[in-house]
Amino acid sequence: MRWGLGVLWALTFVVVLASLRFAFVALEFVQPAMIYHALERPLVFYGHVVGATIALALVPFQFCARLRMRRLTLHRWLGRFYAVAILFGGLSGVWLAMTTQAGAVAGAGFAVLGVAWLYVTGNAVRLAMVGDITAHRRWMIRSAALTLAAVTLRIYLPILAATLGFETGYTLVAWLCWVPNALFAEWILRRDGQRRAVPA
């Protein structure tokens, strides 16, 4: 499990670094399929890019047990930044999904992701505020699984585009980038719950 998390955090770091290209390279060279969003609704587009990138960059820190134990105040502040980043990234993501030219199926996939991302993260924040830390951690696992859709999308899309074509691949990845992540998170939570239920 630790080895797998190490690989996951490394991939997360790579995607975060790759996202910085939007600040230094013209969009037609970086993401030509998305250029219409940047031209027609630049604040929404870059709000999503910045919000999602910040949230992705903060995910590993939120799951660092050493940071939580030794720097609880820092953990809480990073959590606040994470939640605000998702507020911007999620709302703008839903807007982009509703105005996409990729078709209704792809738009629905990304819109549901955006709404779910906002809901599970908001619930995680609410539980932390009322002091239910056990439930807060469970909902943060769900939130992280959806945040990591940014990583799985970049893994699946090149494969799908090469085998099925970009349009079909993009339609499929709108759902595949996050549904398996969410199901895997539920499997982890169920397994953890079963372990805790077994008497010592």
Image (cartoon, grey):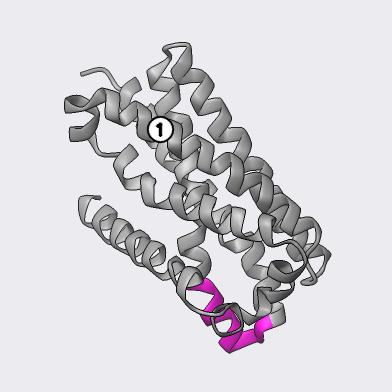
**Residue at 65% across / 77% down in the picture?**
169
Query: Residue 165: image x %, image y %?
Result: 66, 87
The amino acid on which the numbered mark 1 sits, given as a three-letter code, is: Gly
181 relative position to 171: left or right: left
Q: Is residue 50 above or below residue 39?
A: above
Q: Residue at x 40, y 41 (%)?
A: 188
Instruction: Kindly tell me whether residue 29 is visible in this rendering.
Output: yes
| 163 part of magenta stretch | yes
* Residue 164 inside the magenta-drawn segment: yes
Given residues 175 and 99, the one toward you in this image is: 99
Looking at the rendering, the stretch of residues picked out in magenta corresponds to 155-166
Most frequent secondary structure within the magenta stretch = helix
Whole-percent x and y of residue 138? 43, 30
The spot of residue 37 in percent (x, y) is 72, 67
Q: Pick the residue in front: 45 or 33.
A: 45
Task: Tell me which corner region of the image, top left, top right, bottom left or bottom right, holds residue 3.
Answer: bottom left
The picture places residue 144, in percent across and down from the top left corner, at 45, 44
Vertical placement of 113 versus 66: above or below? below
Residue occupying image coordinates x 51% and y 43%: 85
Q: Is residue 115 left or right of residue 62?
A: right
- For residue 117, say whether it is visible: no
Q: Quadrant of residue 166?
A: bottom right
Which residue is under mark 1? Answer: 79
Mark 1 neighbour density, 10 Å: few (under 14) some (14–19) many (20 or more): many
Q: Residue at the spot x=31%, y=30% of the render?
A: 75
Q: Quadrant of the C terminus?
A: top left
